[in-house]
Amino acid sequence: MSSGQLRKHEQFRSRFLRNQRDLIVYTPPGYADRSRRHFPVLYLHDGQNLFDGATSFIPGQDWHVGQTADQYIQAGVVAPLIIVGMYNTKARIREYTPTQVPKLGGGRADRYAKFLIEEVKPFVDREYCTLSGSQHTGIGGSSLGGLVSLYLGLQHSCIFGKIAARFVRTATAEPRPRIWLDIGTREGPRIVQDVEKFRDVLLEKGWKLGNDLHYERVEDAEHNEVAWARRVGPFLQFLYPAYEAAV
């Protein structure tokens, strides 16, 4: 079976953020031969860390998203899907955080939401054979990418029905998106504690473990691309199971 393909859209400009960045789009094996089929979509932050160690923040360390997606799709456990990686910029901290923090800045997550919802998503829906409804649209990331994923996913659950996140704090959304939440024990005891508190908040608000919520505490996992790469396959399988295949 063929492998998925990558296509880069360089210098994608945002009028909301007043900057530009590259987008990299993965299409699943056989995509070119299925012109009448449409596919679910996953939007991931820190796009340069996803597919190629040559472009990642730490050279040689990426998430291996393309290879993992190919493997799980070909094994019949993950639905063929389109994955959109949005590169970060020098304004990463400001764009990925909803509130302003002294010295660090922040507080542009709502503008980043407009960039994603009103600029990136319409572009992807025009250019690719997508299933555009919330039940087919996910958002994910790690660290601050996890923060902004949960913030946008819960604020805009009518757009994003699936969330893959590596940590955060408040929760309210209707309809409830399906959430994958994980944390490595070597990411720091305070972070682990915060994530478990957040899990408990989700449970109190009606999410159910094994149904629309997966929580995983990964022993000895660190806060880096190598650790996160090991969890790509499982979170794809939870959020995009094969029975939700393209139509």
Image: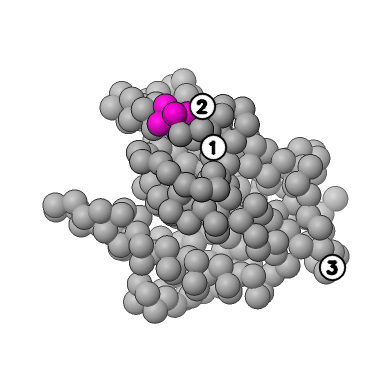
**Mark 2 Cα-neighbour bin, 10 Å: few <14, some 14–19, many ≥20:** some
Q: Position of residue 188 (x, y in %)?
A: 31, 27
Point out the stretch of residues depicted in magenta: 199-204
Q: Position of residue 181 (x, y in %)?
A: 49, 35
* Secondary element type, mark 1: strand
* Secondary element type, mark 3: loop
**Marks 3/1: CA–CA distance:** 30 Å
**Marks 3/2: CA–CA distance:** 37 Å
Residue 172 vs residue 230, the one in the foreground? 172
In primary-sequence order, the first of circles 1 and 2 is 1
In primary-sequence order, the first of circles 3 and 2 is 3
> What mark, if any, has residue 180 been given in the picture?
1
Query: Looking at the image, which residue is at 40% across and 50% down?
Result: 151
**Mark 3 Cα-neighbour bin, 10 Å: few <14, some 14–19, many ≥20:** few
The answer to if 57 sits in the magenta stretch is no
Q: Main secondary structure of the magenta part?
A: helix
